[in-house]
Every structure is written in C-alpha cells, then in structure tokens.
Image (tube, grey):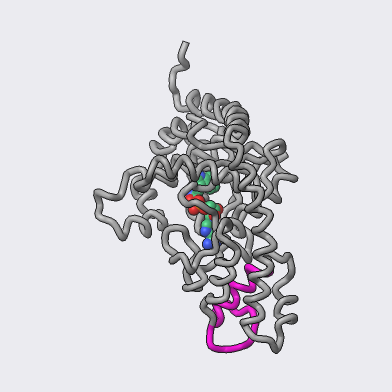
Amino acid sequence: KPRVLSGIQPTADSFHLGNYLGALRQWVALQDSHDAFYMVVDMHAITVEHDPKALRRRTRVSAAQLLALGIDPERSTLFVQSHVPEHAQLNWVMECLTGFGEASRMTQFKDKSAKQAVDRVTVGLFTYPVLQAADILLYRAHSVPVGEDQRQHLELTRDLAQRFNTRFGRTLVVPEAHIVKHTAKVYDLQDPTSKMSKSASSPAGIVDLLDDPKVSAKKIRSAVTDTGREVVYDPENKAGVSNLLVIYSALADRPVADLEREYEGRGYGDLKKDLAEVLTGFVTPVQARVREYLNDPAELDKVLARGAERAREVAARTLRAVYDRVGFLPPM
Ligand code: TYM
C-alpha cells in the first residue's frame, strides 16, 4: 500500500471547517487505500508563544477530534509528534540542506512574521517548514493531504528530498501534495476573500467543529453575502455565497449544481438556514464522540502511545539510513 502522512497543529481548542474540509476529510478517506500516519504536531505549535497547560489540553482535544472524525487507530498510526524524537533529529539534517534564501521565501513565514517585531519572531517559526519536511520524509510518505496553504511547504519538501537523493544517493521518497480542488481553501464567513484561519479570522468568521451548533447557525446566518439574491456558484463575483455552497456541497455530499437548482428562485436566507441544519447534523455526533474520548484520557493516551511506538519503528529506520548516508559514524 502507498503511504500517506499528514499533521495538524494543536493551536486551538477546536478544529474549524477549513481544517476539516481542506484536510481531515481526506485523511479519513485515504485510510482505506493507504498505509496512513497522522499526527498532532505539538512541536510546530511552540514556534509561537504558547501556554504549556493549554498545549497539553489541546493536544488531547486534537487527538480526540481526529478519532471522533473517523481516524481509526487500528488501521492508521495516530500519534503526537514530540513522542517521536526522530523528527527533531532529521530536522537538523534537513536544515543543513536548506538554503537561507530558500527558507526566506516561504510566504507563510513572511505573513506570520510581518506583524511582529524581529526579536519576537522565533528562529523556530523561520525553520518551521524544514521540520515539516522532516515530518514527511521520515515516513517515506507518497501522498500528503493538506489544504492549499501548505502547497509551498510541500514544494520545499520535494526539493529537499530530491537534493538529498542527488547528493547522497537515493534514500528518500519524493512526496506528492494531495490537495482537493473545491475545498482546498475554505473562506472566512465574514471576509470571504481570505481563508478561514485560527490566527487571522475573527470568531464570527470561523466555524469551529466543537462550537455549540446554535452559535454556528448564527454565524452562518450572518455570513457576508453580496446584495444580489441568486444562489449561484461564482467565486469571482459572489465569493460569500460560493463559499457557503462549497461548504454545503461537501458536508451534504451533493454537487454544487444540484444545490444551485434547489435554491433557484429562493433567497440566501433559505440556503443559510438549510446549511446550518446540515452542519448541526454533522457536528452533533462528532461532539458526542469527542466528549467520550475526553472522558477517558488514560485510554486516549494509550492509543497515542501505541501510535508513537509504531511511528518510531518506521522513523528510526529512515533516520538510520539518512545518518549513514551523510557520513555519521555509527555508535558502537
Ligand atoms: P494547520 O494545523 O494550520 O492546518 C491543518 C490542515 O488544515 C488545512 N487548512 C485549510 N484547508 C482549507 N481551507 C482552510 N481555510 C484551511 N485552514 C487550514 C491546512 O492546509 C492543513 O492541511 N504546517 C501544517 C502542519 C504540519 C503538516 C506536517 C502537514 C506539520 N507537519 C506534515 C502535513 C505534513 C499546518 O500548520 O497545518
């Protein structure tokens, strides 16, 4: 079976619809056809200032959400990044292959650092994409399901893998980004020209999976739409309505064209009301399962420990090969 790997940061108390539709839904689907490795990337989460207690809580809540959304720990390897020390070890080798200029061109770093004083921006935030490359290359992943905002990091990962192989001999698998067309970028409900984002969106612009469905329904009702009436998919001129249509289509598993037909001659109000219902139907059982997993943290931690053990077997093998290729003397 080909291998798939992906990660998500535990930087909020809930994942949002962008995370789910852009990435996590594909994680769940790919479990059938792939040998899957999915992780909560807590090491990436400390690249910005954080609260240790919140990080611990969010790491568990993240794992519980992944399980609740359908990641099956029997079929997939589900783990926490910091439990596998090989990530930090391969990261160092990858940093020594990455050009300073190359790292400087990462747009996510430029965006995230632009608003801050230079000494508040950490070196960890700067080298973040290199750690991400190490995450992927450690598992020799063929495919990496992510949203559009990760495309450049995947390009860097491919470049680093190729560079390593050219310089030291074929060792690493060059991965492909798995980015689905329609939901690769879910937009902010209040500002439908920018992506829904944990760090940049206002609370009203984000639909969190663990929010009270009544709160989410209200956010959907107040989503920004244009002054027209027609429910048509036209991202150029009707960004807000198009975003709602994409979300609706994905959650209800119905083509956008179907929805356009259904809402012909009806207004945005009907669309929003029905979408809120579809969303409620989706999140209600997910939330119940998350509560169950969180009620038994010891069992949750056991699942993560088993995952880490499986992940380490694969990671250690790759790291050993890499260390040997770069000329590190094996310890006696
Ligand atoms: P993170 O934690 O920011 O987001 C997790 C996943 O959600 C996707 N996503 C979106 N997709 C569509 N529309 C949106 N509005 C939206 N917002 C977020 C992201 O693209 C991502 O797939 N660097 C990664 C974490 C990471 C990783 C990895 C991913 C670390 N190591 C190795 C893959 C492989 C990140 O910050 O994702």
Residue shown at the point (56%, 30%) measured from the top left: 315
Does the image show residue 65?
yes
* Count of numbered marks: 0
Residue 149 at x, y percent in the picture: 50, 58
Residue shown at the point (44%, 46%) measured from the top left: 129
- Magenta stretch: residue 97 in it? no
Residue 77 at x, y percent in the picture: 64, 36
Residue 183 at x, y percent in the picture: 61, 63
Task: State which quarter of the image contains the N terminus.
Answer: top right
Residue 192 at x, y percent in the picture: 50, 73
Residue shown at the point (53%, 68%) measured from the top left: 187
Q: Is residue 328 above or below residue 158?
A: above
Among all residues in the image, which is located at the extreme top?
A: 332
Q: In this view, does 207 lie above or below 323?
A: below
Residue shown at the point (49%, 30%) measured from the top left: 86
Q: Is residue 157 above or below residue 152?
A: above
What span is colored magenta in the figure? 226-249
- Magenta stretch: residue 235 in it? yes
Does the image show residue 311?
no
Front-lying residue, 232 or 285: 285
Front-lying residue, 166 or 113: 113
